[in-house]
Image (cartoon, helix red, strand yellow):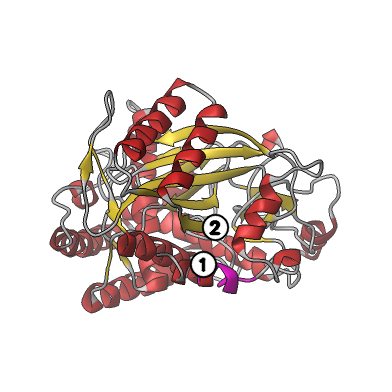
Amino acid sequence: MKIKISKKNKRNIKRSKNNRLSGGKPLFRNINQMQNTIAQSMHDAFTAPNGTNNIRQFSLVSDTSYFGYFYKIDIGNNDTYLNINVNNAPVHSGVRQLGYKVTVVSPNFRERWRAPGGNEKSTVTVREFREECSGQYSVFSATCMDGANSITPGIVACAIYTNVNSIAILNSMIHRSANPRTTATAQQLLWFLTSNNTVRIGLILMEFVPHSITISTAIDQSVGIPLRVTFLANMMRWALLRSAFTTQLLHADFHLENALYSRYPANTGYPGFYHDIDRAGRLIPIDESIQIIDWGQVERDAQISADITQLFAGMHAHIRAHPDEFVNDVMTAMHLANTMSVNVYLQFNTRILNIFTRWLQVARRAGNQYFTWVTRAFGIAQADGIYSFAICYHEARYMRNRNIVLANPHIYNSIVHAPDPAIMNAIAQIV
């Protein structure tokens, strides 16, 4: 199905002043940072024009990862890091929030640790930290340009700091902590770093879509609404499949805390990047987005990748052949799907179950013995079960949004294209 954008709507995308979108995704460095290192870019973003610190506060997003913590940073005005919007021509908006992954790095092998009052955690090795940064950025680079829907947050900085500098960074976080949970986790990190001078912290600075929570939290908040739980769980299944389809990389740590989900109503003035087109050809902001995080455990499997490629070929053919199942509201679309194509979706369910069953076996070889939610079958009766109509619905929207972006040749004019040489160099030099 070729989506046509009306001439009027193309003009609106390029020229509209009153409806200009603020914020969005994915995240890049400003083109004016091309000649700078990522350390200089960080300095530029975190330093206000009057020379004071530009960081407003740190807030904890998730402490469930066994290998670290995920925070959000609020910063003041800057034009160092840019969001890309549908109507960039080449108008951009400076980033006001960043994701901040903190991991403890040990010299030679993983080391379990538990601070007083905290959960058990594990360090990672230098090699594992470097591979996580490299894996995440390779997925971002592969998924952010051809339609600009990155399935993982864009990295703008990453480094491992000395023990002394790590302690200084943690003290700064505590000083700008937004709430007791943020303070407590930073103090737990500080306790371990001061107790063991052989460990350091590794930081990954990345995109943060406003109002992001883990998909696990979103599902917990939706208990009692089976259809919503089904669509959330299958949104994550779709993102895992789509990233593997694009990159041939299999994320091997797919628990429900490793996806960041945002639902930010468009009428708040920050609708985000992701859009759809309605039946009349009008541009429609979509409130929801999802991104997979924690790419420290990545596997490859040629047969699974081939089967995912065939699955997407089948889904795309079905979407083209049955457009009415995907351009209506969810309830109408679902009714049409159940009326017209129920047998097709039953077959897709079985294929997806087979793929994730083998994918889970690959993940288990990497050391993960759980996360079996991905193989739960089938549909709304089992609220988080595989529901291939929802996966096709997300894919159809994703493809239409790509067409919107690709209709504007100026959208990337204001940024350093991925892969950004300075970021690649920083990852390569992690020691």
Query: Which residue is found at the position 55% from the left and 67% from the top?
Result: 423
Q: Position of residue 379 (x, y in %)?
A: 27, 45
User: What residue did someone put label 2 on?
Assistant: 157
Q: How many numbered discs?
A: 2
The answer to which of 359 and 184 lies nearer the viewer is 184
Query: Which residue is found at the position 57% from the left and 39% from the top?
Result: 73
User: What residue did someone put label 1 on?
Assistant: 426
In the displayed orientation, state which residue is furthest to the top: 180
Q: Is residue 227 left or right of residue 407?
A: left
The answer to which of 352 and 114 lies nearer the viewer is 114
Task: Tell me if residue 267 comes above or below residue 28 in the rendering.
Answer: above
Q: Is 419 colored magenta in this rendering?
A: yes
- For the residues marked 2 and 1, what is the alpha-carbon distance in whole angstroms? 8 Å
Q: Please tell me how crowded label 1 is: few (under 14), some (14-19), or many (20+) other residues with Cα within 10 Å.
A: some
Q: Is residue 390 left or right of residue 254?
A: right
Q: Which residues are magenta?
A: 417-424
Q: Position of residue 272 (x, y in %)?
A: 63, 47
